[in-house]
Image (cartoon, grey):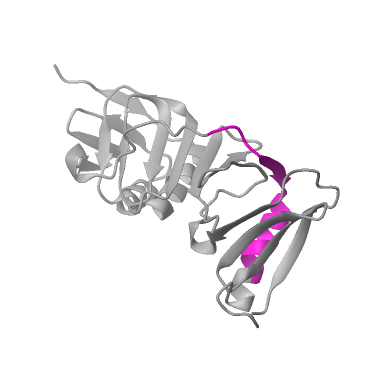
Amino acid sequence: MTTVTKMRLSKETFSLLKNFAEINSNILIKPGNSIKTMSAGRNIYAEAKIQEEFDTEVGIWDLNKFLGVISMFSNPDLEFNDQYVDISNGRSSVRYYYSEASLLTVPNREIKTSTPIVSFDLDENDLNEILKASRILQVSDVKILGEDGVLKIIVDDSANTTSNSFSVVIDENYSGPDYEGKINVSEIKFMPGSYNVELTNSIISKFTHKSQNLFYYIAINRG
């Protein structure tokens, strides 16, 4: 029996998929209203709830190409069949075939974390400054440091003792445990916005978007 689902992608979902394409060029969308992705190195995981409800499994090998095809049209209709999706607007249409699921990088289990030992809010302006400083200073290490009653984020090159650096104080009345963790800036592939950050004793860190049903798990270096 052929399953057909007809919908239009909201701008919000299109933007999320564009963001997910930065994490991994392919994706498997399973039935429901949740989309997930994982980097090829399996050190970045992202999940979001979307407005649309999928009734069939959709495997896309080249997500940027797929989104580019959708962009050819103005607010097109997407008709999802078992093996392909028809993308159409008026007299023009594209038939786009799915990829085999076995060829895709698919998150196959839920990420479970222990109780956070450090939790803080990361303002969108601070996040933008961190990314901007990394580009201008040409350094890639983003260090989260909690000590002496202060929690701050430092951007530098940890391997270079004379590296230029940028820092921003996140909490000047920090009362949590001493903490040091490091993320490569290339792993910060977030949608714009402010985030709640949760750090544990393990390598897992969780970044939860404060105005969307969206979160990222990133492996953090505690060494």
Tell me: residue 220, above or below residue 94: below
Residue at 25% in and 38% down: 59
Q: Residue furthest right?
A: 173
In this rendered view, identify the residue nearer to me: 218 or 4.
Answer: 218
Which segment did they paint magenta? Answer: 114-133
Tell me: residue 109, above or below residue 148: above
Q: Quadrant of the C terminus?
A: bottom right
Q: Quadrant of residue 17?
A: top left
Q: Residue furthest left?
A: 1
Q: Residue furthest top?
A: 1
Q: Quadrant of residue 180?
A: bottom right
Q: Is residue 88 left or right of residue 191?
A: left
Residue at 61% in and 70% down: 134
**Residue 166 position within the rendered picture, expressed as x and y whole percent measured from the top left:** 71, 70
Q: Is residue 223 left or right of residue 61?
A: right
Q: Is residue 36 left or right of residue 55?
A: right
Q: Quadrant of the N terminus?
A: top left
Q: Is residue 216 left or right of residue 5?
A: right
Q: Is residue 217 visible?
A: yes
* Residue 27 covered by magenta stretch: no
Tell me: residue 170, above or below residue 99: below
* Residue 132 covered by magenta stretch: yes
Instruction: Say how many tags the image has.
Output: 0
